[in-house]
Image (cartoon, grey):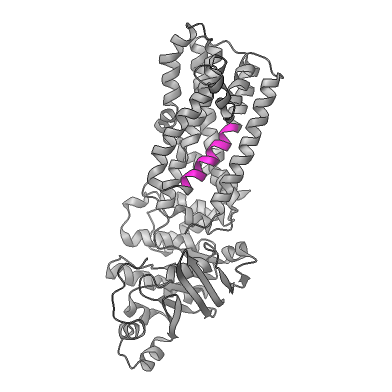
Amino acid sequence: MTALAALTGYYLRTSFTNKFAIVFGAVQPLFYLVIFGPLFSRSGVGSWDTLVPGLLVQLGLMSSGLVGFGIVFDQRFGVLERLRVTPTARSTLLFGRVLKDSAVLLVQAAGIIVLGYAFGMRAGPVGVLLGLLLITVLSIGMAALSYAVALTIRMELFAPVMSTLVIPLMLLSGALLPMSLAPTWLDVVSRFTPFRYAVEALRALFAGSYTSPTVLWGVLVTLVFVAAGFTIGTKVYQRENT
Amino acid sequence: MIHVRGLTRSFGAVEAVRGVDIDVSKGEIVGFVGPNGAGKTTTLRMLTTLLRPASGTATVAGRDLFADPAGVRRRIGYVAQGGTVGPFSEVGEELVLQARLYGLSRTEARERVAGLLEELDLAGCEKRPAGQLSGGQKRRVDIAMGLLHRPELLFLDEPTTGLDPQSRTNLWGHVRRLREESGMTVFLTTHYLEEADALCDRILIIDHGRIVASGTPSELKAVHDAGTLDEVFLAVTGHELREGAAA
């Protein structure tokens, strides 16, 4: 417990001293909100209450999905090895990082939501808070997976591979335009990505239907995703580096 | 303090360590030397739980390496070859985090870090990013990382490589003092044999993944009828260059 508190506190301190990085991590969804949002809300496809949930999942992919980049440096400078030689459990070493990542995501998501309200979003506070909870939980799985990928592939490949991979994942989730508009094949493909369920659950929550099947599916898929992500993350973290 | 029999480990087709036996008693300073690629770092990383041996038995600091790796970690310090802190990280903060991972409370951690920085001639470096320190200072920070929990046994992987003679002498002084003041056992690798001669009670020479010679510096010199450890080293491991061998 001491170890987890120390790690999380340490990572939070180092992250939040760099405020620019926190804003920059959310820059893509911010662009979409400010430049694409006004078009979207007048397109007849949906309102700000449709778009903002999508942007939150985009944020999850862009912010938590790319955190693995940080561990690449820790590995290079011997920090990772130094942490591994302490008696602290490997899962704790990973969880400390991931807790920081979800805290950063929470702050970024709150910023997007506040801006969304300023533009004309009308979602009720309960739905928004539940949505924040869901996206924060989802980010744990994303961050853990991101670290797993970073520790597995060659370090110079991480940035190009991941920043390319998150684009189709984001588009397939229906984050920008709802998948209800999609032709059948695209709709089918998108059902194989976990993020679609999160986007739809967030939209339902923002619309005020807290117990609809869409929300339950979203929660279920997210929990499975987080469990899988954290298990894989811990396994990779545990693996000896050769 | 260390009892190892038949330790092996391969990487793919490369047999890095092929059956190593090591015995180190409490309070000894042992130098572990060998050409690049001989298996020094692989052996060290196995003894410090970072790499799982393929076979063999090992007790390190009184704990079984295979059955109780966490128990081993609690009792040993390990300072890797490549450093421990990123260039932009504040030394003090990193040390406090490390101390807390060894179970010290926040207050204990701060006191311990302040004390260690003082002991290792690093007072005043606490708030500085590691990238601004000199090579010798950085290396002493790395060593502090391995000492926070007052381990019984300290592993140092090439602690003096790349340092100027002043920093090297200073660092050896610290290692000696650790043993004198707290009876710490020290197991270190080095390429500077004249220093190993002056500092170590015993030398182990490893080559091609096997221990090829061991003894006190004077025993080794007597057996091989050599004036210096460098001569012993070359007699035991040959004169040819090891270019292309993995580090």
Q: Is residue B202 in view?
A: no
Position in image of residue A40 (x %, y %): 47, 11
Tell which of A146 and B152 is nearer to you.
Answer: A146
Residue B93 colored in magenta in the image: no
- Is the stretch drawn in magenta largely helix, strand or loop? helix
Tell which of B224 and A216 is nearer to you.
Answer: A216
Q: How many marks?
A: 0
Tell me which residue sits at (61%, 25%) in the image: A197
Tell me which residue sits at (56%, 33%) in the image: A139
Above/below status of A203 relative to B231:
above
Magenta highlight range: A138-151
For residue A211, what is the image quadrant? top right
Above/below status of B211 relative to A27:
below
Position in image of residue B117 (x %, y %): 43, 59
Residue A139 colored in magenta in the image: yes
Q: Is residue B142 in view?
A: yes
Tell which of B63 and A154 is nearer to you.
Answer: A154
Position in image of residue A236 (x %, y %): 54, 50
